[in-house]
Image: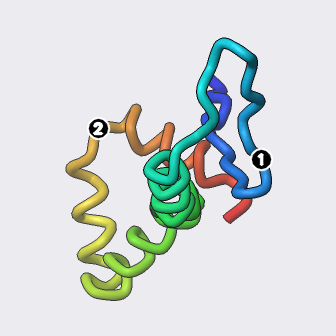
Amino acid sequence: MYLEPDCMLMSHFEEPKVTEDEESPTEQDRRKKMLALKDPVHTVSLQKFIYEKLKAQQELLGERGFHALMETVDTEIVAQLQEFLQGF
């Protein structure tokens, strides 16, 4: 089963098009957008984040401890993780 990566790209260069019926963005709207652009949800790769966290646990627990921990995880979850992290 292949899961298509889901992502949302935001750019500070894109200003929404304003029609005659709409009001132009307020300073508060611009501030919220700038905060959202700094949000890790929009700036950090989920694959990289998960890979780094698993690698850190592997280094912390050692090869044997990490393997024992991963054996407690549902096999379907492990298979999905492996597929998701292919290429890392």
Q: Secondary structure at mark 2?
A: loop
Q: Mark 2: give few (<14), some (14-19) or many (20+) Cα within 10 Å.
A: few
Q: Mark 1: give few (<14), some (14-19) or many (20+) Cα within 10 Å.
A: few
| In the image, residue 16 above or below residue 60 | above
User: Viewer-proximal residue, 62 or 36?
Assistant: 36
Residue displayed at 29% across by 38% down: 74
Is residue 11 shown left or right of residue 8?
right
Is residue 29 shown left or right of residue 24?
left
| Residue 38 in sight | yes
Is residue 29 shown left or right of residue 84?
left
Looking at the rendered image, the quarter that the N terminus falls into is top right
Looking at the image, the residue that sits furthest to the top is 21
Closest to the camera, between mark 1 and mark 2, is 1
Q: Secondary structure at mark 1?
A: loop
Residue displayed at 31% across by 85% down: 62
Give amino acid for label 1. Glu
Residue carrying label 1: 14
Residue carrying label 2: 74
| In the image, residue 61 above or below residue 21 | below
Residue 82, position as x, y percentages in the image? 55, 49
Is residue 10 shown left or right of residue 26?
right
Give amino acid for label 2. Asp
- Mark 1–mark 2 CB contact (< 8 Å): no
Residue 77, position as x, y percentages in the image? 38, 38
Residue displayed at 25% across by 82% down: 61
| In the image, residue 72 above or below residue 7 | below
Residue 11, position as x, y percentages in the image? 72, 53
Looking at the rendered image, the quarter that the C terminus falls into is bottom right
Q: Quadrant of residue 47?
A: bottom right
